[in-house]
Amino acid sequence: MKYLALGIIALLGVPPILCAQSQQTAAKAIPRAEAVQPAAAPAAITSEPAIPLRPGDVVDIRIANVPIDDIQQWDAPYTVDESGMLNLPFVGTLKAGGYPPSQVETLIQNKLISDGIYTNPTISVTPPTGMRFISVGGAVRAPGRIPYTSDLTLMTVINAAGGRSDFAGDKVRLIRSGKVINYSWKKLEKDPSKDPEVQPSDQIEVVESNW
């Protein structure tokens, strides 16, 4: 076969050296297949809605990018008071209730910068650790503690406690920070838009009927 190929080349008038060079060039022009790594599947992103801070919550606040002496003044636990305010060094009182911790961080940083206290502070606010609960008692079928979530209302908490018992009256008490607020179950059923949101550490009592 080798001699036959050379004979054909000779008949065509193509020098063997040029033919060999053409074969080498063609071989170089064909790239080798490279192993392509499959693209990694994007990681599933799961996030839970941030729970806003409420009166009575105790948060840890840390500060960075400030003088070392000032860091010690900031690094401490702080309690959200009944008005939803935090009392902070150099800042005074600042609204925190109703905001998630990440937003409170931004509020504090912006306040420190706008007041000319620091040029580039970094604030971290650590929310309360552990599960937060709402206590439900009185004329309900399953009294106890209900884990707090941001979408709970007075009526949904009572329903989560098994609902009102056969002895339940119309009055429902909401006890928050020592203050008692009375609601009518019939009015709330008639107009659910008036169903109030609850807060961590609230106490709810369904009052028994007088009969």
Image: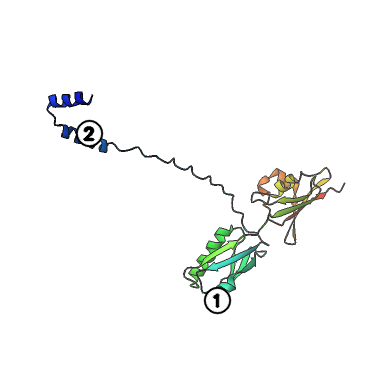
The residue identified by callout 1 is 69
Asked whether 199 or 106 is in front, the reply is: 106
Report the residue marked by disc 2.
Answer: 23
> Percent position (x, y) of residue 43?
51, 45
Q: Secondary structure at mark 2?
A: helix
State the residue in front, 169 or 47: 47
Amino acid type of the residue that numbered disc 2 sits on in the rendered structure: Gln
Q: CA distance from mark 2 to mark 1?
A: 77 Å
Q: Position of residue 7 (x, y in %)?
A: 16, 24
The colour scheme used here is: rainbow
Report x, y in % for residue 118. 49, 71
Q: Tell me if mark 2 has few (under 14), some (14-19) or many (20+) residues whose alpha carbon lies within 10 angstroms of its own.
A: few
Front residue of 101 and 210: 101
Q: Nearer the viewer, residue 154 or 14?
A: 14
Q: Quadrant of residue 93?
A: bottom right
Q: Answer with left or right where residue 18 lies relative to residue 194.
A: left
Name the residue rendered at 86%, 49% in the picture.
210
Quadrant of the drawing holding the N terminus: top left
In this rendering, the answer to whether 23 lies above or below 88 is above
Tag 1: residue type? Asp
Residue at the image position 59 percent from the left and 53 percent from the top: 50
